[in-house]
Amino acid sequence: MDVHTDIPARDIETIGRTARHAARALARTPGVVRDAALRQAGSAIRRHAPSIAAANQADLAASTASAAFRDRLTLTPARIEAMAQGLDDIAALPDPLARTLADWTRPNGLRIRRVPAPIGVVGMIYESRPNVGADAAGICLKSGNAILLRGGSESFATAGAIHRAIAEGLAEAGLPQAAVQIAPSTDRAFVADMLAAAGLIDLIIPRGGKSLVTRVQREARVPVLAHAEGLCHTYIHAAADPEMARRILANAKMRRTGICGATETLLIDAAIAPALLPVLVADLAALGCAFRADQAARAIVPALPAAAPDDFDTEWLDSILSVAVVAGIEEALAHIERHGSAHTDAIITEDEAVAVAFLAATDSAVAMWNASTQFCDGGEFGFGAEIGIATGRIHARGPVGPEQLTCFRYNVFGTGQTRP
């Protein structure tokens, strides 16, 4: 059965009510059943890989976007398999609802237990990367939440093909297909409907560019778990191992330039910049990277293009690196505070005291020592996948996996107590 074809006639009220009903069912569903549904969905994605790939080719054929954007949109056979494997990996994680967070007994004998609870219905608005839909659906199912997905218009056909496979897996496991739904069309008005759907949607998660996140935060009448820009920094300290710095920076910038964990700015200590910066520039240039450099960096490598005033505030999502020379850790931290987005920032150094100071002072969701910023990823953190990188300060921060999509409630056990 094509579970997608009947959706266009449905509005946010209908979709929201069916999602709410499915969320209540999921909250009462044993973890082993939710895990079985995840595995069935993964199997369905593998079975339908040819149709998913064909839909993706149709989306790509209609796209006139940049190479970096097209990379985010593209689903290779390996990426389709990774989607399916991601669902299997999520299924193998501990049940985030089968925990006791706290347990204590009051002097009157009342026993109080704090336990996890699903958030309810999650609305996910995302751009370009169609695999995000599968990851988000898997994380929500694992944590007992229903989800409504609204992907970008550029990936509409791909998102539909992925959704059909996941819905097939849910049906095979005996779970309501309404637990995972997608927007019925590319009509932008549906986004406004989602943002206004208080009482139907419990949490909105935007995952995309700055304009999308800003709009969601400005217009939403539903709580928002924000995913801000990935304006990530790698700071090479004077005590860095030069070979390690070369390896890490090349990976952090060029492994995949279009992801939010890619390094966008290199900060390098003035003490080592004359010797090391030309080598780093040569390494990255050989990989196809372009540069925007401050005056101090250009004094060392004159061929570097000068940075414009707003370049250090730009998330390139492309093969471009901003470069600045700093006079030590305090200047590096000041630069990150002034220009960063509180996503992921890294230091490369062999000086443990300096590294500890950097980790303590960096007010970002993720701070790293001697590692590529591209490790800021739910799969790499052991979450199976992620629904995004939360950069706010309420609820979750960093990669958002199944555990981060739960809240909590209290169970109170008495033996006949009444309050005086």
Image: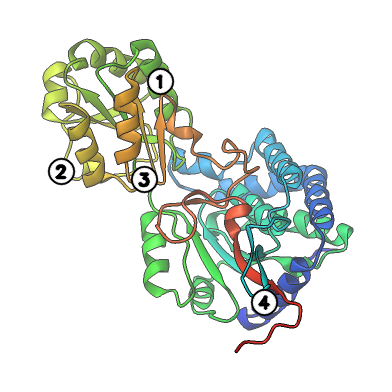
Query: Is 4 in front, or is 369?
Result: 369
Q: Is residue 76 left or right of residue 128?
A: right
**Circle nearer the N terminus (3, 2):** 2
Residue 405 position (above or below residue 361): below
- The residue positioned farthest toward the bottom in the image shown: 420
Q: Of discs 1 and 2, which sits in the foreground?
A: 2
Assess disc 2: are there few (<14), some (14-19) or many (≥20) residues with their C-alpha within 10 Å of its C-alpha: few
Under mark 2, the amino acid is Pro
Q: How far across and how far down the image is residue 301, in percent? A: 17, 17
**Circle nearer the N terminus (4, 3):** 4
Query: Which of the labelled discs sits on residue 364, or is there none?
Result: 3
Q: Residue at x 20, y 40 (%)?
A: 334
Q: Of discs 3 and 2, which sits in the foreground?
A: 3
Q: Is residue 186 left or right of residue 83?
A: left
Would you say residue 184 is visible in this rendering? no
Residue 54 position (above or below residue 217): above
**Circle nearer the N terminus (1, 4):** 4
Task: Tell me the quarter of the picture where residue 23 sits.
Answer: bottom right
Query: Is 189 in front, or is 375?
Result: 375
Q: Which residue is mark 4?
A: 15
Residue 126 position (above or below residue 253): below
Q: CA distance from mark 3 to mark 2?
A: 23 Å
**Circle nearer the N terminus (4, 2):** 4
Q: Which residue is mark 1?
A: 287
Q: Residue at x 38, y 50 (%)?
A: 229
